[in-house]
Amino acid sequence: YLKDYKYDITFISSFFKDVESLNNIDKIVNFRTTGIIDTAPKPNLEKVSLINIINSFGSKLNVLDGGAFRGEFLNFLLNSGFRVNQYTAFEPDIKNFKFLQKSEFKNISTQFINKGIFNENIDLKFDNLGNTSSKRSEDTLAVASFVKLDTFNFKVKINLIKLDIEGDELYALEGAKKLIKINKPILVISTYHKPEHLRDILLFIYNLKLDYKFKLEITEFSTFGVDLYCY
């Protein structure tokens, strides 16, 4: 792991100015190089860093949820006391989507889209597992539709984007470049699916030249949840 990513680790660390993020990087590297379960960093299940970032924002939230599953991210926001004005959810798995449609969120305008997010409007093979691991796969005959966010007609100005889409996060960002440049939303991006993703996503966001600040939070056990916050 260090042989392949040692230079990247130094490069990645240069984007972060806070001690917590730098410590999290050290913990992730230690765990992934030793493989010893006892060295796995403890997650912040309450997502305190994200709560603090959104609190500093101070406005009602217009949320784009990529990989909505069954609305867990919206429930997290509401349970944390945030005011959500508009919730636009993309969920390509038809089983998850049907469950999402049945959800009721009072006093919130919702829009549920049975599509994934990609860097073009396209139909792709998708396994429809009906769980949080549903993803694009060549080992299935099932197909799902995917949308390029820059071509989607949003009802409001989006100010918070969350992406947890099983390794397609960078593709989604490529297709949302215009949206991000115009709105400069808070970004909550899952980066654990591929080892190179944290580096590549950081570089992509940095190259948009929007003066984003970055923070890294571990949100699940065994680093199966490493979220990058751009704000």
Image (cartoon, rainbow, N blue to C red):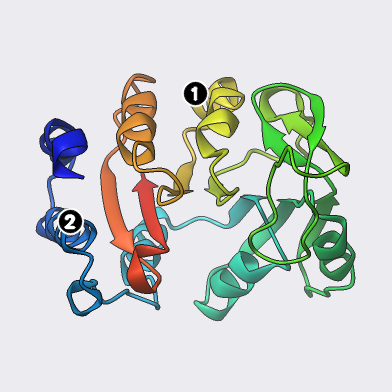
User: Taking 150 as reference, is 42 above or below it?
Assistant: below
**Residue 105 percent location from the top left of the image:** 78, 73
Instruction: Find numbered disc 1 in the image and state the secondary structure of the residue it sits on.
Output: helix
Work out whether residue 57 or residue 19 is closer to the camera in this orientation and state it: 19
Q: What element carries label 2?
A: helix
Q: Look at the picture and state if 111 lies above or below 213.
A: below
Between 25 and 129, the one nearer to me in the picture = 129
Which quadrant, please, contains the C terminus?
A: top left
Crowd class of label 1 (few under 14; some 14 to 19; many from 20; radius 10 Å) = few
Query: Where is residue 54 drawn, in percent x and y?
Result: 42, 59
Kindly identify the amino acid type of the residue bearing the numbered disc 1. Lys
Q: Quadrant of residue 35?
A: bottom left
* Drawn side of residue 220 relative to residue 10, left or right: right
Give, as a three-letter code, the residue at label 2. Answer: Thr
Q: Which residue appears at 90% of the width and 64% of the height?
A: 98
CA separation, marks 1 and 2? 37 Å
For this view, does 62 lie left or right of residue 16? Answer: right
Q: Residue at x 44, y 58 (%)?
A: 58
Left or right placement of residue 212 versus residue 86 in this view: left
Looking at the rendered image, the quarter that the N terminus falls into is top left
Q: Residues within 10 Å of mark 2 (few under 14, many from 20)?
A: few
The label shown at residue 33 is 2
Which mark lies nearer to you, 1 or 2? 2
> Based on the displayed image, in which of its 4 quarters is residue 120 positioned?
top right
Work out whether mark 1 precedes mark 2 in sequence or the reverse, and give the earlier one. 2
Q: In which quarter of the image is residue 5?
A: top left
Q: What residue sits 52% from the left and 29% below the top?
A: 180
- Which residue bears the numbered disc 1? 181
In the figure, is residue 175 to the left or right of 156? Answer: left
Q: Where is residue 127 in the image (x, y as percent from the top left)?
A: 78, 50
Residue shown at the point (60%, 48%) measured from the top left: 165
